[in-house]
Image (spheres, grey):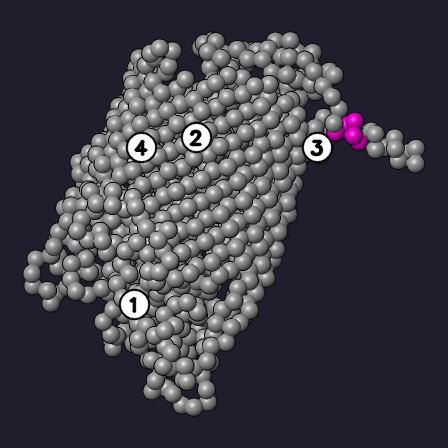
Amino acid sequence: MMKQSLISSAILTALFSSNVFAADIKGKVLDNNNQPVSGAKIHLHGKSQSVTSDKNGQFTINVDVDSQLHITKNNYLDERLDVTTSNGYVTVVLKPSAVESIVVYASALHKNSIEMASPVTVLAGDELKNAAKPTLGETLKGQPGINSSYFGPVSSSPIIRGLDGPRVKITQNGLDSSDASRVGPDHANTNDSLSAQQIEVLRGPATLLYGSGAIGGVVNVVDNRIPTDIIESLSGAAEYSHDTVSNTNTYAAVLEAGHEGFNFHFDGVSRKGGDYETPQFNLPHEEHGEDDHHDDHDHDAHDDHGSEADHDDHHEEAPETANKVDNTYIDSQQVNFGTSYVNDHLTLGLAFGRIETDYGIPAHSHEGHDHDHDDHDDHDHDAHDDHDDHADEHTEEAVYARVKQDRWQALFNYSLHNQWIESINVRAGYTDYEHSEIEHGATGTTFKNKTTELRTGVEHRIGEWHGIIGYHYSDSDYEAQGAEAFTPATETKSHALFLLEERTFGDFTLELGARIEDFQLSSLVTNKSHHDDDHDDHADDDHDDHGHDDHDDHEHDDHDDHAEFETVAYELDMTNFSASIGGVYNFAEGHNFAVNLSRSERAPLTAELLSNGTHIATGTYELGLGYEIEEGEIHFEPQTIEQETATNVDFSVRRFMGDFGYTVNVFYNDIANYYYQQNTGLMYTAEHGLEEADHFHEGASPVFKFVSNDAELYGIELDAHYRINDKNRVKVFADSITAKLDNDQYLPRIPSNKLGVKYEFEHAGWKANMTITRYNSQSNITSYETKTNGYTLVDTSLQYDFSAQGIDFVGYANIDNLTDELGFVHSSFIKEQAPLPGRNLKLGLRAYF
């Protein structure tokens, strides 16, 4: 017993020893011209908190164990300095980086963007604030390898190297956003760029830390709602901006305070605007004709977008035109509160955020759908009357979305005094999300998602290896009710163990990683079975095959004698394994070469597996992988579902010192059992069921079914910077992607290639830039798409930094699409109805105190 007690005491002493030997180390951060660097972050390895250098470059940090200081500053190369408690004063010299160099929180091992084996892009600071749009997709689309799904400017998700939806994980501080943006392109993501400190985009599979949903990449939104540093004074910022293209006013504020390790954080964003204006364009016939058929959503043949050709030969009249996109207004409020306690070893915090957003859904109609108008008084859109100045005479029939989200996050981090264990980190989150689609003041369809997530990691050193081992749990309870409930209620759980290790061999750093994930999906689906009687002649009058009890059941009461519907308790249980090996070789000063090889497995999500119904937003009838069409009927037969497996290799060459710097990424992604939608050639109506395309009735929707096939995606990305002198800088960026199946058919809605050049000028508080981006035409299309013409966007901005009454101000004026170019986004489901916004002047003022 005494021996056990001694061992226990030794362990507790090693883990939780007090800072008897603590000492303050003072220091100064300088640049290579021996000038002080303010705002540099100094972080003691193994701890979550950091300190910041003041305007004279000076700092003080408490050190209670021999360790390493990690000094970072955006656009400078990181420095690491070994220190002991006996160090009294240190001087750190930071070398400027020729390309953006920012610490990536999503890397888990405190790496910056030029040290990682896999390619990453980070937007931060004023660059992020000035580029911020209502959606992540529009905020990030100008970066190499990143594009936007674009369902109008208020609903747009990022596309990374041609992959989006369930293949791109969108996280907030490392935890899933947990909205319904992966169910359909008209569902907006709930992350707001203005409240973020930085946004990180990890290209290629990032499944090791973030799960199988990250098979295409990760977008991590980093904010400070749970402060991890000790705040010693009151500080904050406020911003106002106005966009002329949509008459949008945006207000944002952040406030932070602290005392003796107790911290408080608040941030809020309010955005309200109307329908956005465009250059004049031809409306598709569905926008102004009697036909409510939605086959304009990239699913049948149309003339090239942006051309003056007629869209339908039998219409002799000239096409109707428009200079704005109706039903694209937004009215959004978001607030976040957070608090934390921070000392030398412990960080403990809790945060709560609420989002309430109404936004119009363009090209979205529910004609022919009956909604229950009873018991919806609480959904009466009192504010909708305020949008009369945002929409035209068709607003009364338009559909808008009402999004509500409550999100809790918790953080625990403990830094240990131990040779092997550096820190223990736990992040937990709970999200209650609701997306309702409302017409005439009544709720037509409601999507709900409640998610619980836990991620814990132990950062350690074992010999020469540095790494993290962890456990990740997620439970998502999703349901959809109403006329567009084309997916059933589903519960998805996952348990995973992950390991990431690195070791340095001289100028080469080796990275190894693995993850094993137990994925469980459970749902109640319905399947149709017929009596032995021959009722084939009534097949077109049968149930609509949705398998959703609340979907138009009343339409089929007279036909119950022809079909029976059995409820099937379906479960999918898969084990996903992912692994990677990579390395970074610093072959010369300021140069490195990175390679990363990964293999990632993914199980299908609800929409891909169990869809069975009309999806109004895309104008199609969607069927999941679990369904088969036999003799004109739909049956649930999920026996042959296999995992989607991606084998991805990335090569990167970087030059990051001197006046000229660049990053070149080349990637190849070979995906087995790639899930995608295939045109069946059939049409569907609720009254007549499935029909051959050449005999369909008015109002029918094309039937698209998820299938799997092998695919390959490959391409190149370029980001180069040249510093002409202290005042002038030029940047060139480009990307190119090819995505096709093994049968040489191109995948649908793959973004076009782009090439851009940016000029920057900076002098005496003034900053100006101009960006010219050419989006090429896209003719590498699948059978049911049409070519999209290319376009060129010219964007410019002017910024002035000044101070008054002890407050730092930033005034700015941005002009987007300076030449008022008409552009259609090939990756959009509604590219004909929703071209890009026209010329927009954005005026803003930002204050820091």
Q: Secondary structure at mark 4?
A: strand
Residue 529 relative to residue 349: left or right: left
Residue density around tag 4, few if under 14, some if 14–19, many if 20 or more, within 10 Å: many
Q: Secondary structure at mark 3?
A: strand
- Residue type pointed to by label 1: Ser
Mark 4 and mark 1 lie on one chain; the one further toward the N terminus is 4
Residue 770 relative to residue 492: left or right: left
Residue at the image position 33 percent from the left and 11 percent from the top? 804
- Residue type pointed to by label 2: Asp
Q: Secondary structure at mark 2?
A: strand
Mark 1 and mark 2 lie on one chain; the one further toward the N terminus is 2
Image spot of residue 580 (x, y percent): 57, 46
From this view, report whether residue 397 is shown above or below residue 701: above
Mark 4 and mark 2 lie on one chain; the one further toward the N terminus is 4
Alpha carbon of mark 3 to alpha carbon of mark 2: how far? 34 Å
Image spot of residue 484 (x, y percent): 37, 62
Residue at the image position 46 percent from the left and 34 percent from the top? 336
Query: Foreground residue, 152 or 249?
Result: 249
The segment highlighted magenta reads 11-15
**Disc 4 to disc 2: CB gap under 8 Å:** no
Mark 4 and mark 3 lie on one chain; the one further toward the N terminus is 4
Disc nearest the viewer among 1 and 2: 2
